[in-house]
Amino acid sequence: MEAWVNRHVMLAVAHLMIVAKSFGVDSCPMEGFAGDQIKAAFGIPETVDVCCLLPLGYAAEPSKAYGGRFPLEQVFFSNEYGQPLQL
Protein backbone atom coordinates (compact mmCIF):
# COMPACT_ATOMS: atom_id res chain seq x y z
CA MET A 1 0.00 0.00 0.00
CA GLU A 2 2.82 2.44 0.86
CA ALA A 3 4.44 2.07 -2.58
CA TRP A 4 1.07 2.59 -4.30
CA VAL A 5 0.34 5.73 -2.27
CA ASN A 6 3.84 7.13 -2.86
CA ARG A 7 3.48 6.68 -6.63
CA HIS A 8 0.17 8.52 -6.66
CA VAL A 9 1.50 11.29 -4.44
CA MET A 10 4.43 11.77 -6.84
CA LEU A 11 2.00 12.02 -9.79
CA ALA A 12 0.20 14.83 -7.97
CA VAL A 13 3.53 16.46 -7.08
CA ALA A 14 4.63 16.35 -10.73
CA HIS A 15 1.42 18.09 -11.82
CA LEU A 16 1.81 20.68 -9.07
CA MET A 17 5.37 21.38 -10.26
CA ILE A 18 4.17 21.88 -13.84
CA VAL A 19 1.43 24.28 -12.76
CA ALA A 20 3.80 26.14 -10.44
CA LYS A 21 6.31 26.60 -13.26
CA SER A 22 3.56 27.92 -15.53
CA PHE A 23 3.14 30.71 -12.96
CA GLY A 24 6.91 31.28 -12.80
CA VAL A 25 7.31 29.52 -9.44
CA ASP A 26 10.29 27.18 -9.02
CA SER A 27 10.13 23.89 -7.14
CA CYS A 28 12.22 20.86 -6.30
CA PRO A 29 10.87 17.62 -4.76
CA MET A 30 12.84 16.46 -1.74
CA GLU A 31 13.39 13.01 -0.30
CA GLY A 32 15.80 11.78 2.34
CA PHE A 33 14.54 14.05 5.12
CA ALA A 34 13.87 13.15 8.75
CA GLY A 35 10.13 12.44 8.70
CA ASP A 36 9.80 12.56 12.49
CA GLN A 37 11.31 16.06 12.58
CA ILE A 38 8.98 17.25 9.80
CA LYS A 39 5.98 15.83 11.67
CA ALA A 40 7.07 17.53 14.89
CA ALA A 41 7.72 20.88 13.19
CA PHE A 42 4.34 20.99 11.47
CA GLY A 43 2.17 19.14 14.01
CA ILE A 44 1.51 16.20 11.69
CA PRO A 45 0.01 13.16 13.47
CA GLU A 46 2.02 9.93 13.72
CA THR A 47 -0.63 8.14 11.62
CA VAL A 48 0.25 10.30 8.59
CA ASP A 49 3.21 9.41 6.37
CA VAL A 50 5.26 12.22 4.85
CA CYS A 51 6.78 10.79 1.66
CA CYS A 52 7.87 13.98 -0.08
CA LEU A 53 8.46 17.66 0.50
CA LEU A 54 7.93 20.22 -2.27
CA PRO A 55 9.45 23.62 -1.59
CA LEU A 56 8.04 26.37 -3.82
CA GLY A 57 9.58 29.77 -4.43
CA TYR A 58 11.50 31.99 -6.79
CA ALA A 59 15.11 31.14 -7.59
CA ALA A 60 17.51 34.04 -7.12
CA GLU A 61 19.55 32.84 -10.08
CA PRO A 62 20.32 29.55 -11.80
CA SER A 63 22.68 27.41 -9.73
CA LYS A 64 24.68 26.55 -12.84
CA ALA A 65 24.73 27.51 -16.46
CA TYR A 66 22.31 25.57 -18.66
CA GLY A 67 24.34 23.05 -20.60
CA GLY A 68 21.78 22.42 -23.32
CA ARG A 69 20.34 19.13 -24.41
CA PHE A 70 22.10 15.94 -25.44
CA PRO A 71 22.26 15.35 -29.19
CA LEU A 72 19.49 13.07 -30.50
CA GLU A 73 22.05 10.41 -31.48
CA GLN A 74 22.99 10.07 -27.80
CA VAL A 75 19.48 9.54 -26.40
CA PHE A 76 17.42 7.95 -29.21
CA PHE A 77 18.19 4.63 -30.81
CA SER A 78 16.57 2.45 -33.45
CA ASN A 79 15.63 -1.16 -32.66
CA GLU A 80 18.39 -1.68 -30.10
CA TYR A 81 20.75 0.30 -27.91
CA GLY A 82 23.61 1.90 -29.81
CA GLN A 83 21.98 1.51 -33.22
CA PRO A 84 21.54 5.04 -34.63
CA LEU A 85 18.01 6.29 -35.22
CA GLN A 86 17.54 7.28 -38.84
CA LEU A 87 15.47 10.47 -39.09
Image (spheres, grey):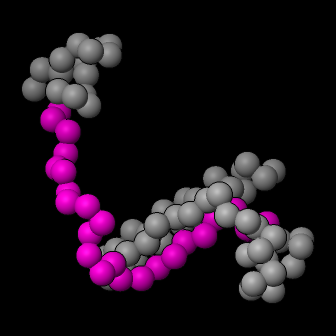
Residue 21 picture location, percent across and down: 34, 74
Residue 86 picture location, percent across and down: 12, 20
Residue found at the very far left of the displayed protein: 87
Image quadrant for the C terminus? top left
76 over 58 or under it: above or below: above
* Residue at figure coordinates x 19%, y 51% from the top left: 67
77 over 22 or under it: above or below: above
The answer to whether residue 44 is visible is no
Is-magenta flag for residue 76? no
Q: In the image shown, does 69 or 65 lie closer to the viewer? A: 65
44 over 65 or under it: above or below: below
* Residue at figure coordinates x 48%, y 63% from the top left: 14
Q: Is residue 48 left or right of residue 28?
A: right
Instruction: Specify the quadrant of the image occupied by residue 50.
Output: bottom right
The residue stretch that appears in magenta: 49-72
Is-magenta flag for residue 61? yes
The answer to whether residue 4 is visible is yes
Residue found at the very far front of the displayed protein: 64
79 over 8 or under it: above or below: above
Q: Main secondary structure of the magenta part?
A: loop
Q: Is residue 71 left or right of residue 29?
A: left
Instruction: Specify the quadrant of the image occupied by residue 41.
Output: bottom right
Instruction: Specify the quadrant of the image occupied by residue 37.
Output: bottom right
* Residue at figure coordinates x 89%, y 71% from the top left: 47
Residue 31 picture location, percent across and down: 61, 59
* Residue at figure coordinates x 73%, y 75% from the top left: 38
